[in-house]
Amino acid sequence: MKHITDAEQTARPCWDRPGEHFLFHYTQADLADAIFEEQCFLVPNRPGSQGYGLYVTNIKPGSRPDDFILKTLFAFGRDALAIEGVVVLTRDSLPFRRVAARSFFHAAQGGTTLDLSGLLVGSGRRDRGTWRWTAGIFS
């Protein structure tokens, strides 16, 4: 995966542009890389609070402390590794329904592979506290 340089990171990310809206799927860094590279999401065989499917949020990376994100998304049911990676999806990518103030859900059967080609903007991974992004985040 091609990551942008530190100098390129001074540009504004896509979600900071006026009128732009995106959704974020937080996960482990290696899983975020794989989702973006493969352009698909394998629905876990373990249901979440709303059942099987893809969970996303409108919480922008870096906008809230880790404890807030962990509590809001996982009710502290996961450790900080669960938010070290993120994939960024267009707002109109899949039919999501709101399940909480900051959480959205797309139902799909466990074990199903969701095709996300054309729906992913980019991905990021946190490295020693600094987010590293794929080029699509800043284009």
Image (cartoon, rainbow, N blue to C red):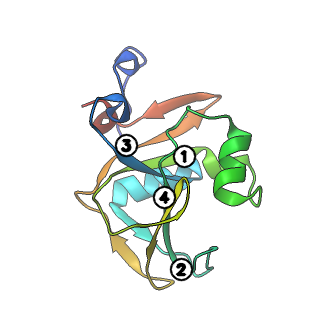
Which one is closest to the eye, mark 2 or mark 1? Answer: 2
User: On the image, numbered disc 1 is attached to which residue?
Assistant: 85
Vertical placement of 7 versus 17: above or below?
above
Of circles 4 and 1, which is in front? Answer: 4
In this picture, is 93 found above or below 114? above
Q: CA distance from mark 2 to mark 3?
A: 28 Å
Disc 2 marks which residue?
A: 52
At x 69%, y 43%, the residue is 68
Alpha carbon of mark 2 to alpha carbon of mark 1: how far?
A: 21 Å
Query: Circle 2 — which element?
Result: loop
Sequence-first tag of 4 and 1: 4
Dot placed on the residue nearer the N-terminal end, 2 or 3: 3
22 or 84: nearer the viewer = 22
The quadrant the N terminus occupies is: top left
Q: Amino acid at mark 1?
A: Gly
Q: Which mark is residue 1?
A: 3
Q: Residues within 10 Å of mark 3 (few under 14, many from 20)?
A: few
Q: Residue furthest front?
A: 101
Q: Which one is nearer the viewer's eye here, 105 or 43?
A: 105
Q: Residues within 10 Å of mark 1 (few under 14, many from 20)?
A: many
- Residue bearing mark 4: 56
Return the x and y of residue 30 as percentages of the image width and height.
54, 51
Amino acid identity at mark 4: Val
The three-letter code of the residue at mark 2 reads: Tyr
Query: Closer to the N terminus: mark 3 or mark 4?
Result: 3
